[in-house]
């Protein structure tokens, strides 16, 4: 099975900061990597698909990069509504494993 | 507007069974793969199962293989998850999600809570 490892597990940041979250796959997954945002009590929301494509309706301050085993989610100019938990997920294999999540908190 | 609405969650004793449903609307249900994802309280997302568009192919996480069965009724635009031999560790909110291009889960339901306890 493909394992997905996110780092850091949590971070504190201020409004306006640039935030970077990384996700590493245990084997190459090409660009079959997606990023989700989840707020407490809510369903996850797709932000980025296929490593770098912005889902419709998602603000352009969110961006993704990477291929193979190493991927990055970047949030430029963090906004108050961006404080949430972020997950990566691979769809290269049938078992669509998620990373453990990164909680972005207010500093 | 795409909508996914889960139902069927509740309290069940260990060893019991439960069937979850996910009613889909706003898109051509029969054209999309569908997934179940769960989340225990305070924990991360865990992929559970998926089914292809015509129901002929399914996959399961090792933790539920042999106990859970995913199915769909394209005439009723409904996805199901039959859960048998339930364990305490199956306690979670269960989400259904649509499988989009490149395997992304582009729409999610609001989730239904399953609690396995004596």
Image: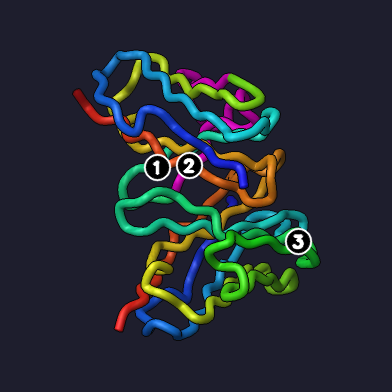
Q: CA distance from mark 2 to mark 1?
A: 6 Å
Q: Is the C terminus of chain B in the top left, top right, bottom left or bottom right quadrant?
A: bottom left
- Residue identified by numbered label 3: B30
Q: Is residue B91 magenta?
A: no
User: Callout 1: residue from which chain?
Assistant: A
Q: Dots 2 and 1: beta carbons under 8 Å? A: yes
- Residue identified by numbered label 2: A45
Residue A56 visible at all: no
- Residue identified by numbered label 1: A38
Q: Which is more toward the observer, A86 or A99?
A: A99
The magenta-colored residue range is A44-65
Residue A51 appears in which quarter of the rendering? Answer: top right
Please tell me whether mark 1 sits on a helix, a strand or a loop.
Answer: strand
Where B88 falls versus B43 (above or below)? below
Q: Dots 3 and 1: beta carbons under 8 Å? A: no
User: Residue furthest toward the left?
Assistant: A107
B56 sits left or right of B4 in the view? right
């Amino acid at each position: 099975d493909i394992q997905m490892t996110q780092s850091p597990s949590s971070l504190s940041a201020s409004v306006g900061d640039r935030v970077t979250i990384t996700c590493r796959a245990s084997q190459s997954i090409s660009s079959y990597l997606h990023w989700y945002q989840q707020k407490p009590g809510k369903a996850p929301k797709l932000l980025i698909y296929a490593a770098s494509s912005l889902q419709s309706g998602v603000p352009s301050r969110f961006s993704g990069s990477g291929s193979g085993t190493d991927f990055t989610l970047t949030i430029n100019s963090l906004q108050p509504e961006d404080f949430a938990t972020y997950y990566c997920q691979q769809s290269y294999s049938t078992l669509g494993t998620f990373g453990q999540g990164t909680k972005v908190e207010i500093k | 507007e795409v909508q996914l609405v889960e139902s069927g969650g509740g309290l069940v004793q260990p060893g019991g069974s439960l069937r979850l449903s996910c009613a889909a609307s706003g898109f051509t249900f029969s054209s999309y793969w569908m997934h179940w994802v769960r989340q225990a309280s305070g924990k991360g997302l865990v992929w559970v199962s998926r089914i292809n568009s015509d129901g002929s192919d399914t996959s399961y996480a090792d933790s539920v293989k042999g106990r859970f069965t995913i199915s769909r009724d394209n005439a009723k635009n409904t996805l199901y998850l039959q859960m048998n031999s339930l364990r305490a560790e199956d306690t979670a909110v269960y989400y259904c999600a649509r499988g989009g291009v490149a395997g992304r889960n582009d729409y999610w339901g609001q989730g239904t809570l399953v609690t396995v306890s004596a």
